[in-house]
Image (spheres, helix red, strand yellow):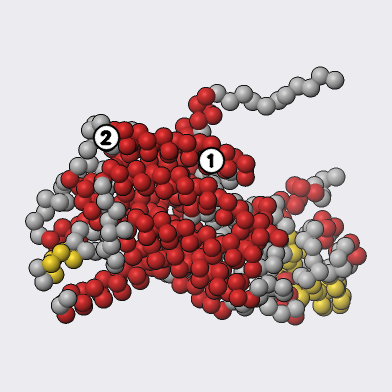
Amino acid sequence: MKVRRMEKRLSLMEKLAIPEILKGLSITFRNMFRPKVTRQYPEERYEAPIALKGQPLLVENEDGTPRCVACSMCEVVCPAMAITIKAEETERYIEREPEEFSIDMLRCILCGLCEEVCPKEAIIMSDRYELANFTRESLVFHKDRLMTPIKELEGRIRFTKEKFDKWHR
Amino acid sequence: MTTAFLIATIIKVLVLFHMVPIMVSLLTLAERKVSAWIQFRYGPNRVGPWGLFQPIADGLKFFFKEELVPEGANPFLFRIAPALAAGPAMMTVAVIPFTFPILIDGQPFSMAIADINIGVLFFIAMSGLGVYGILLGGWGSNNKWSLLGGLRASAQMISYELSMMMSVITVVMLTGTMNLGEIFSFQGEHTWILFFFPVGTIAFVIFLIAAFAETNRLPFDLAECETELVGGFHTEYSSMKFALFFMGEYSAMFTMSCLLATFFLGGPTFFGLIESIDSLWLRALIGFLVFAAKVGLFLFFYIWVRWTLPRFRWDQLMHLGWKILLPISILNLMATGILIATGVLS
């Protein structure tokens, strides 16, 4: 079998090495004055794009009531079993609302299935990505910490409407 | 010897000796900063303004780390090796004249700690000792990678020290003295050795390349060689012992830069401008600043090259040392002799 050598033949200038070294040095010297790419994190924060799936939150209507009807769809679909819902009756038109709604952020994998499955657009993935804390208890989010005014989540709600095409199928 | 002379000497020794650890700590910061800039990063900027106190934080961290002596290590050699690495590198500073001599009690007062007539020999002896720290550290650790690193360091030192000394002898032949202070004053009277074309220039290039190998810096850091040997000779070292190896490396870098500036760039002289200043004190001060600028240039070059070039392969290193640099330096030495004998250079 004929063997073809793929080695590059070096020219005399390349064999002398010193001109090539100087070339390399000039590249690194120019690099020193180029703009930096580092993000100075605590001061310069990452602005999450709308498609980012962060901490799931519950939507709170303008009158302060939860949108959630406690249908338990998200609880069933959650692959990590992070959601726990206890339903109760309410005088409002929707008749049911969650008495207890908790998301265990130690288990949550931020997959967004709960948001996808929700018939009421009541659970929405937010852009909150700083999910570290010191105790296990503080990472189990209850209703009081999950309820978020609808105004803060409007962008993401519009995005999910387009993404899942929920009401026009 | 008068009292004023004695006091001045003590002050000189204290200042110059403490300059080395301070330079070493600043160099570690400079290394990290320059590497960061080359890689489009900012580098340490949290501890103090522009990260200036980062070396202190690093030093404190080294002090509080656990000291570990591996099982089967030779305890004596393992403990003495870091001191042997750092000591000789720092001692070389003793012969370096940092600036022009001043007058104390009517006598010229040299700015080198030891103004000896065999300054060049002292430097050669000390840089030869530097390898023992690395070799014994590698041998005493009872670790195959450390041993390989130590072996490589010693082989590398032997092969590059020869060509380095040949180029130093070229300088000695040209200047006709082994006293470092007289070497730079000769260059002030004539011109820098670097401009003694071609012999001085070739000697400069050889010394520059060999200095990289002597201080175990990239592209010749085969003694450390992270990709093959974990950490090389300091694989098993921790805490302050590890820091001492680092101090040895950086102070060797500093002394090598000082020597490069003294041998080839005329030390504190600058084309007769500074020598013409009449006031001795002012002349010494400005001379010191010029010397510092030259040394800084070389230190920056060291760091710059480290973050530019990849590591040489072992056989390439040996090839370069024995087959290229050594013959060139010997020929250069002979050419210098012929040029001086025929009176072209005097």
**Observer able to see residue A48:** no
Residue at 60% of width from left, 72% of height from top?
B77
Label 1 resides on the chain identified as B
Q: Secondary structure at mark 1?
A: helix
Residue at 23% of width from left, 53% of height from top?
B182
Q: Secondary structure at mark 2?
A: helix
**Observer able to see residue A162:** yes
Q: Give x and y (percent) for residue A151.
A: 64, 62
On screen, residue B271 versus residue B19, left or right, reads left
Q: Examine the image and state in which quarter residue A153 appears.
A: bottom right
Label 2 resides on the chain identified as B
Which of labels 1 and 2 is toward the front? 2
Amino acid type, callout 2 = Ala
Q: Examine the image and state in which quarter residue B71 appears.
A: bottom right
Residue at mark 1 shares a chain with residue at mark 2: yes
Q: Give x and y (percent) for residue A17.
A: 51, 33
**Above/below status of B191 relative to B342:** below
Do the residues bearing badges 1 and 2 touch, measured as CB atoms within 8 Å? Answer: no
Circle on res. B254: none
Residue at 17% of width from left, 76% of height from top?
B1
On screen, residue B185 versus residue A102, left or right, reads left
**Above/below status of A40 relative to B260:** below
Circle on res. B322: 1
Amino acid type, callout 1 = Trp
Q: Give x and y (percent) for residue B191.
A: 22, 41
- Badge 2 local density, few (<14 within 10 Å), some, or many (20+)? few
Mark 2 = which residue?
B341
Nearer to the camera, A63 or B153: B153
